[in-house]
Amino acid sequence: MTAPPRPAAASASAPGPGASRPDADRPDTSRPGTARFSPARLAWLRSPVVLGVPAAAIAAGVAVLLVIGSGATPAEAGQALADGMFGTDYAIGVSFNGVAVLMLIAVGFSVAHRVGLVNVGGEGQLCLGALAGTAVGVKLGDGLPRALGTPLVLAAGFAAGALWAGIAAYLKVRRGTSEVITTLLLNFVGIGLVSLAVHEEALLRQPVTSSETLPQSEPVASSGRLPLLDAATSPATIAIVVAVASALVVAVVLRHTATGLRLKAAGRSAPAARRAGLPVGRLEGGALAVAGGFAGLAGAVLVATAPYVLDEGLSSGYGFAGLVVGLLARGSLTAVAAVALLLGFLVSGGINLQIAAGVPASTVQVAQSVLVVCIAGAMRWTAARPGGGAR
Amino acid sequence: MSPVSDLLSGGVHLALPVLLAASGELISERAGVLNLSLEGMMLTGAFASVAGALQSGDATVGVLCGVAAAVLFAALQAVLSVTLRADQVVVGIAANALALGATTYGSRVMLGDDRNATVPSFDELPVPGLSDIPYVGPALFAHTALGYAALALVAVIGLAASRRTGLGLAVDAAGEDAETADRSGLPVRGIRYACVLLAGLTAGLGGAQLALSEVHAFTDNMTAGIGYLAVVAVIAGRWRALPTALACVFFGIAQALQFTAPALGVDLPVAVLVMSPYVIALLAVSGLVGRSRAPACLTVPFARTG
Amino acid sequence: MSAVPSLTWRAPRARPAPEPFRGGAAPDEARSSGADRADATVTLELEGLTKAFGATPALDAASLRVRAGTVHCVLGENGAGKSTLCNLVFGAHSPDAGTMRLYGEPYAPQRPADALAAGVAMVHQHFSLVPTMTVAENLLLGTGLRLRPPRRELLGELDAVADTYGLSLDPDARVDALPVGIRQQVEIVKCLLRKPRLLLLDEPTGVLDPAQIESLMATCRRIAEAGHAVVLVTHKLAEVARAGDEATVLRGGRVVGGGPLAGIAQSDLVAMMVGRRVAELDPLLAAGLGLEGARPEGVGPEGSGADESAVDAAPDGGGPPAPGATVPAAAAATSAGAPRAAALAVRGLTVRRPDGTTALDAVSLTVARGEILGVAGVEGNGQSELGAVLAGSLRARSGSVELDGHDITAAPPARRTRLGLGVVPEDRLHEGCIGELSVAENLFLARLADFRRYGLLDRRALNRAADEVVAAHAIRTEDSRAPMRTLSGGNQQKVVLARELALDPLVCLVASQPTRGLDIGAVGAVVTRLRDAAARGCGILLISSELSELLAVADRIVVMYRGRALGPVRTGEPGARERLGRLMTGADA
């Protein structure tokens, strides 16, 4: 009935950096006499990479329009963006720190995703992880070696995030409540808890000495902070190493262990997995808790990175961005790394866009969400296998 | 006026934008589409209504602009989640980011010079006599023209959504069992499109109400999560009209408590009040307070196989 | 065309009728004039209809004609393309090639709404009713998008349907609280309210008892007599004999024969369906097709012979193992202690459904080692729950279950498996296996710990072990690494059986509807495996709604009726079939 939809992006090649690429597939379909839309012939078109290019082109096109609309030239803006992303060692370092946070959340998301759960609660779990990390971090003595202090802060974050997700896991396993809804709600409670903690002296607020005292915590003790990769030139911490290591470990567990296969089995068919004697409830609950743990770890990483304090704006949407990374990567940890890199660098580039070119930083946010919308919209197309009649 | 009366009145006024958005979202979720993008729709509605009111100098034109923009925005959600069958959670979150970015950009570029200009807006029109009734009067009979229209619209939607009407039946069928609805000759996708657009309409109106009746201005991210709150109200109301409305009013009162708490002699940290709606919704949805069941096809896209 | 009652109960885009119902007069009116034209009018004409899902054609250039005033049977095995044909006519699928004509006019429905508007209605195999709505609300769904649904008119029309067809319903009952038989009536009434010119019924008798089937067939005849056409899709010949005027036989998506039923012998129909001579058929398979009642001469002697040998193989349980078969260690150990060891003993099992009705009512039964105990009954009388309780996926309210002397009443599935209980679940794709995992992964999911190397999963060893099983059980797949969903239903069932029969120890196997949806060859393979396992000393509880199949395979049969286990009846006894039939309808209860 309906011809397979062409990727919408291919025809709408907006002016922009990526505009020349989408034409690559044209000769294939315009050749007379060849079978149109034969599934095998067009299978390569379903590759996420092929779709990513036109999607990026559209996003870039929108960005260019917004840049022009705000009175700057695309060249200026591009320069500012690039400077913000890669221009200096400092910029690169900041970007990598952001990438690490996104990656950790998305890695956790992938674990839950494998057992068929959607963890929308990264933001709240991150908040709880940051809370716990701060609570431990401000109490650490300065004499403590870093090799002990930093892992303590990170472990506290992981545990708190896992516990927070554990609430949703409990409700899912025991009461069958949809984890999408509970984790979503727990986000707002988590954000509220951070706000509560930094406003109340009895909790984590720094001692109020004047009316100018900011509602934030005391700084984490130096023994609890994340070491820098290269202290001389860049603010990049070992967070990126932690994130990459986490991704590797998770990838191996999911792909090459019995546990990974059990998670997959429980995710694809809980009744069949139960029939085979697998502890489905424990697998689901465990996976969701681990997902929360990684998000909590990300929160601890944030407070263990300069400026080492907990405040209300700490997360600034990392949880949601990490969720988007996880959803777009769809269980592939290679894709998690790639998408986190892309989004992480774009965000830090956007800040410089405003400073250097006078273009509102929200331009990057718009472009980024257009990109996500395009990819989400084309997801069915990439997921569809020839002959696979998925409902 | 007494603090209690203030609280009630303030609560209803704060609840009204949420109530509007929740009424459309209730229908949409019962038809099977979860619009996390409600937040973005409201923000879009608020921005466009202020922009329209400033350009035209007329608040009513502003409202129309706000609604039109929000419906257009909802159309994006509809195309993605109904036709393209994209993941509704991703689309919702991305759409919110898009709306936040776009309105922030827009207010820099378009409203930049008019930032401090007076926005043509609606004035309160207290109903003589009725608005003097203790407690209830200020809450129900001291709204702007837009506010009264909003209340009426919510009432109509609430009634139309019941299973006593053919429309309500069709909507529930699409959300409970899309395949059966299709085999019964109902246009499932059409119903879902209409419901998402309706959610856009009410959310846009809610945004306009917020901007033109309450705040009289546009500020960056001025909805600050009340779109999510509307989604939460539907969940806490367990997908039924009256409980959803009550949840909205309750959330409004919790917000109003932030301002009236000192007068009432209550000393609660603001953060606790901000969190409370979500905790209540969590209790409701986890079955600790009553039983709850989401529409069976909520967030499940519909397509005939083959 | 004027003879056809106008469609007043129609799809949304049709003009709104001021008076949605016309009462019961229309069918009468149509009957008189429709009868004259019965032979002249072709209601539905399909020409070269083709539909492929992926690479495999489900329907391949099928052509057929359905005349007004007739019941037209579409016959074929599972997978022959019958449902696809229905879905094409109903607009749920679109054909890749070919044309359809309805009353001579081109007909190309894009969606079910188009079909309904054109006067085509369909009774779906798995129903199309919203479970959380009442009967009346479900019936009103067809009235389209209006503010005020015509409730009062509906009640009037329901009375008319009750008068005409003898189908009366409680409009305020919630559908999910109704038994399946009633749900099907709701589904049929939903179609009748639309006054269809053409009614499609897709395998409508699977969930009905003999009396209900009888009345459904009578309803079909009455609809046909009213001048409309009925297309009855089925794989059971008995139904055809009762109600059909003409038949079309499908095999592998192609039309392989057909014509007026009066001119075709049943044996020829079967030969067309399965592509083999009836005489060559295993009598068991013939039984599965419902050939029992009118079994042609060629089959009888061989059939009864095989039946007897099946019974003889394990008369009292614990019969001598077949030569060469290895007796499981556990079986040998227990049979030494007790001469007639019970593999499975169920006592006083009671289960309530979530809606409060009783699913199982103090059910007691014993499966001896080496015995095949059949569980018969019309679906919905507690068989599913019995299977679920024994599998450990449903908790009993009271009663006990003992496996080989071990109390497993509250044991989780894993413990049951360890103690030697194999389970072939009713819902193969949902519970039996996981479509996205490979054949190898499905085979060894419960035993992954055996394939560990340096803490990682040793996939090479896993696949090697799976290859052996695939070869031993003649499972047709490209590769043991192929995803389970790429296998045919029969081969999926072979995988499930292979996994469960490989348990060590294997004391008892509970098989729920193991042959449902399988083609003839696969049914044979499954049954052979079950018989072999019994011969090796395993007790087998075989739950099936195919009575004929049970008669051919089981030693004893109990009948589930309203949650109670009636019987048992020995299959060797004279008059066993009649006695079972009476038990199934509650006549002997």
Image: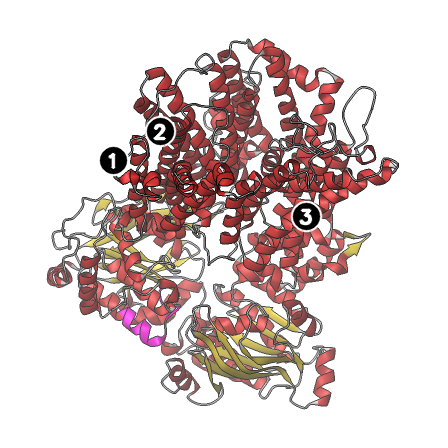
Mark 2: amino acid: Val
- Relative to B154, is A228 above or below? above
Give the image location of residue A357, x and y in percent. Answer: 59, 11
In-front residue for pair A133/B192 = A133
The picture places residue A37, in percent across and down from the top left corner, at: 47, 33
Observer-side mark, 2 or 1, equals 1
Instruction: Indicate the secondary structure of the residue bearing disc 2.
Output: helix
Badge 2 crowding class, 10 Å Cα cut-off, few under 14, some 14 to 19, many 20 or more, is: many
In the rendered image, residue C176 lying in the magenta stretch gets the answer no
Q: What is the secondary structure assignment of the residue under circle 3?
A: helix
| Label placed on residue B67 | 2
Q: In percent of the image, x 53 and y 65: which residue is there?
A: C522
Examine the rendered structure and indicate whether residue A119 appears above or below residue C533.
Answer: above
Q: Is residue A177 left or right of residue C216?
A: right
Q: Quadrant of residue C347?
A: bottom right
Labelled disc at residue B198: none
Is residue C206 highlighted in magenta? yes
Which residue is labeled 3 in the image? A162
Which residue is the site of mark 1? B128
* Mark 2 vs mark 1, CA separation in Å: 30 Å
Determine the CA span between mark 3 and mark 1. Answer: 57 Å
Query: Which range of residues does the magenta coloring cover?
Result: C204-217
Whole-percent x and y of residue C11?
25, 48
- Whether A244 is drawn above or below C573: the answer is above
The image quadrant where one finds the C terminus of chain C is bottom left
**Which mark is first along the chain, 1 or 2?**
2
Check disc 1 and give the amino acid type.
Answer: Pro
Q: Is residue B72 above or below residue A106?
A: above
Q: How many marks?
A: 3
Of the residues shown, which amino acid type is indicated by label 3?
A: Ala
Return the chain for callout 1. Answer: B
Q: Residue at x 35, y 27 (%)?
A: B68
